[in-house]
Amino acid sequence: MRVRIKRGTPGHNPPAKQASGEGPLVGVVAGVEDGVHQVEGLRLIEDREAQDNARLHALREAARIGIADVDAGRFRSFESPVALSRHLNAIADKVIGGKPATRRR
């Protein structure tokens, strides 16, 4: 981890001894805290990028599979949105088992 150590106080130019590294360090804790926050921020960014990459990979794979299915003729066409809805409800009824799903009119 890279930590920036500040000498002197904000808005104040340290005397020559402090600037050269011979004087007491002021603001070391602030420098460490800044470094910790930066590391946490970078970690969050890296996690977000990894999640985004995983989603993109999954989307590309789903698209590849869908295109392959269409190319192989594995698809169904429906004459209307109502026909599609009936088909999907029938599948849901089979999967769920039990009484037919409530249908909107």
Image: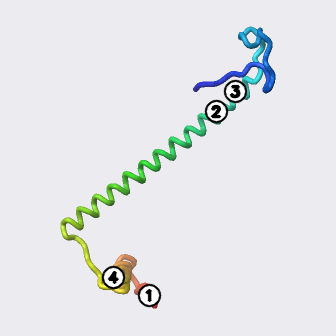
- Which sits earlier in the primary sequence, circle 4 or circle 2? 2
Mark sitting earlier along the chain (2/1) = 2
Which label was assigned to residue 103? 1
- Specify which label sits upstream in the sequence, 1 or 4: 4
Q: Is residue 28 above or below residue 95?
A: above
Q: Position of residue 78 (x, y in %)?
A: 29, 82
Residue 67's spot in the image, x, y percent?
A: 26, 63
Provide the residue designation for mark 4: 87
Residue, disc 2: 36
Note whether 27 is above or below 103 in the view shown. above
Q: Quadrant of residue 89?
A: bottom left
**Helix, strand or loop at mark 3:** helix
| Residue bearing the label numbered 3 | 31
Q: Residues within 10 Å of mark 4 (few under 14, many from 20)?
A: few
User: Label 1 sits on what residue type?
Assistant: Arg
| Among numbered discs 1 and 3, the one appearing first in the sequence | 3
Q: Hey, what amino acid is under mark 4?
A: His
Q: Residues within 10 Å of mark 3 (few under 14, many from 20)?
A: some
**Quadrant of the drawing holding the N terminus:** top right
Residue drawn at x 27%, y 60% is: 65
Marks 3 and 2: which is nearer the front?
A: 3
Q: Secondary structure at mark 1?
A: loop
